Amino acid sequence: MGSIAVCPGSFDPVTLGHLDIITRGSKVFDKVIVSVLHNRNKQPLFTIEERIELLKQTTKEIPNVEVDHFNGLLIDYVKKKKANAIIKGLRAVSDFEYELQMASINRKLDEDVETFFMMTNNNYSYLSSSIVKELAKYHASVNDLVPEIVEEALRKKYAFSN
Ligand code: PNS
């Protein structure tokens, strides 16, 4: 069996920062499963179906990337998919504390699953889905922050607001 990594997130919506991590991860692991969390605590802008579709469209050129979704604990999902790794992007020191906590909890739950961190490309170190939504909401350009189809989807979402 080859190496399978899960790249989890809300992806509301997918940004060029996410795609950078997914693309680089796909060169290291035999298969990368990008999985969208159904997050009941957060009120997402895009439905789960929309987030999955945007991810599928933007990763379709990468043959060893699969898009899926999950509920509940990440570690249970990782085991269900027979994966042995979790991939995360780290943007700045501010991400570190939370990610250390998550990685430690996940290792306590299953020490056979390893979390791998990749430093985000410097061009995207300030980028987040929240920032992208904030800019798009006020009709500022998100041109070089997200793929074109995501920009279009954001434009439609916010077309009648403000
Ligand atoms: O893109 P996000 O919102 O930063 O992604 C966060 C995510 C999905 C990676 C994280 O919230 C997660 O793993 N949630 C699943 C629940 C879980 O396993 N929590 C850790 C143990 S308490």
Image: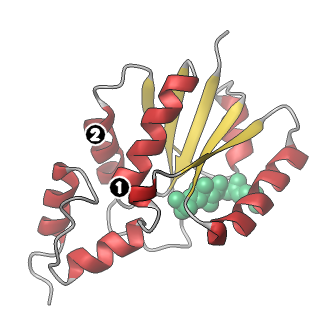
Residue in the foreground of this view, choosing between 137 and 35? 137
How is the rendered protein coloured?
secondary structure
Q: Position of residue 32 (x, y in %)?
A: 52, 29
Residue on which the image places disc 1: 15
Q: Position of residue 23 (x, y in %)?
A: 42, 34
* Residue 41 horizontal side relative to residue 74, left or right: left
Q: Amino acid at mark 2?
A: Thr
| Residue shown at 34% from the left, 51% from the top | 16
Instruction: Classify 45 as above or below 52.
Output: below
| Residue shown at 43% from the left, 50% from the top | 18
Instruction: Classify 160 as above or below 23.
Output: below
Residue in the foreground of this view, choosing between 105 and 15? 15
Helix, strand or loop at label 2? It is helix
Residue 34 appearing in the image: yes
Q: In the drawing, what numbered circle is on residue 90?
A: none
* Residue 152 horizontal side relative to residue 91, left or right: left
Res. 133 image quadrant: bottom left
Residue 68 appearing in the image: no
Helix, strand or loop at label 1? It is loop
| Residue shown at 44% from the left, 74% from the top | 43
Q: Position of residue 128 (x, y in %)?
A: 43, 66
Residue on which the image places disc 2: 58
> Which badge, 2 or 1, is on the more N-terminal residue?
1
Q: Position of residue 2 (x, y in %)?
A: 64, 12
Q: Amino acid at mark 1?
A: Thr
Q: Quadrant of the N terminus?
A: top right
* Residue 23 horizontal side relative to residue 147, left or right: right
| Residue shown at 44% from the left, 29% from the top | 66
* Mark 1 neighbour density, 10 Å: few (under 14) some (14–19) many (20 or more): many
| Figure label count | 2
Residue in the foreground of this view, choosing between 147 and 52? 147
Residue at the extreme top of the image, as rendered: 1
